[in-house]
């Protein structure tokens, strides 16, 4: 059974930084693409970032490109999302997800089989 758990969320002022971590247990993620999604109050869940199984290829939604960095440590079964220059509009619950069927990261939430419970990120103005 694959389990996904996010951590690292919190309250930060605009312009600040946070690093989210995603720990996966139950299966090695070295062949899994991984992604981060977020859901703000009253809005649908949206894609944030994805990373290929090797970690070489990454993709980001336009609104976070240049501010957020996704990375992974396959030896530790961990995925990270470094968030810099945070804005109030980044406030959301952030979810980590695992796609065991593809080596490249996808922006489609339906491609991801395993999801964490989410971690709250709140950016104050």
Image (tube, grey):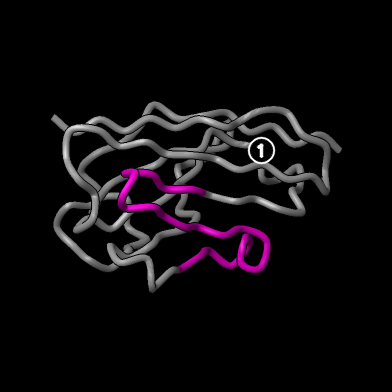
Left or right, 12 with reference to 100 = right
Residue at image coords 63%, 33%: 121
Residue beneath label 1, please? 91
- Examine the rendered structure and indicate whether residue 34 appears above or below residue 77: below
Residue drawn at x 54%, y 40% as measured from the top left: 20
Q: Quadrant of the N terminus?
A: top left
Front residue of this view, candidates 98 and 90:
98
Residue drawn where x is 73% and y is 28% of the image: 11
Q: At which x and y percent is residue 88?
A: 76, 42
Q: Residue at x 30, y 37 (%)?
A: 24
Answer left or right for 12 relative to 98. Answer: right
Task: Label 1: state its secondary structure.
Answer: loop
Please provide percent x and percent y for residue 73: 39, 52
- Expressed as whole percent of the image width and height from the top left, the position of residue 83 reads 64, 50
Which of these two is toward me, 31 or 46?
31
Query: Observer-nearest residue: 102 or 80?
Result: 80
Image: magenta residue range: 59-80
Position of residue 15 relative to residue 107, above or below, is above
Left or right: 55 with respect to 94?
left
Give the quarter of the image for residue 16. top right
């Amino acid at each position: 059974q694959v389990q996904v758990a996010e951590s690292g969320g919190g309250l930060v002022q605009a312009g600040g930084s946070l690093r989210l971590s995603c720990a996966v247990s139950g299966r090695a993620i070295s062949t899994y693409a991984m992604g981060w999604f977020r859901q703000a109050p009253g809005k649908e869940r949206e894609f944030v970032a994805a990373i290929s199984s090797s970690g070489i290829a990454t993709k980001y939604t336009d609104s976070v490109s240049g501010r957020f960095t996704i990375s992974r440590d396959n030896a530790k079964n961990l995925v990270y999302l470094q968030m810099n220059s945070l804005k109030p509009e980044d406030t959301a619950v952030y979810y980590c997800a695992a796609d065991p069927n593809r080596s490249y990261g996808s922006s489609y939430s339906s491609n991801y089989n395993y999801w964490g419970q989410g971690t709250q990120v709140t950016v104050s103005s």
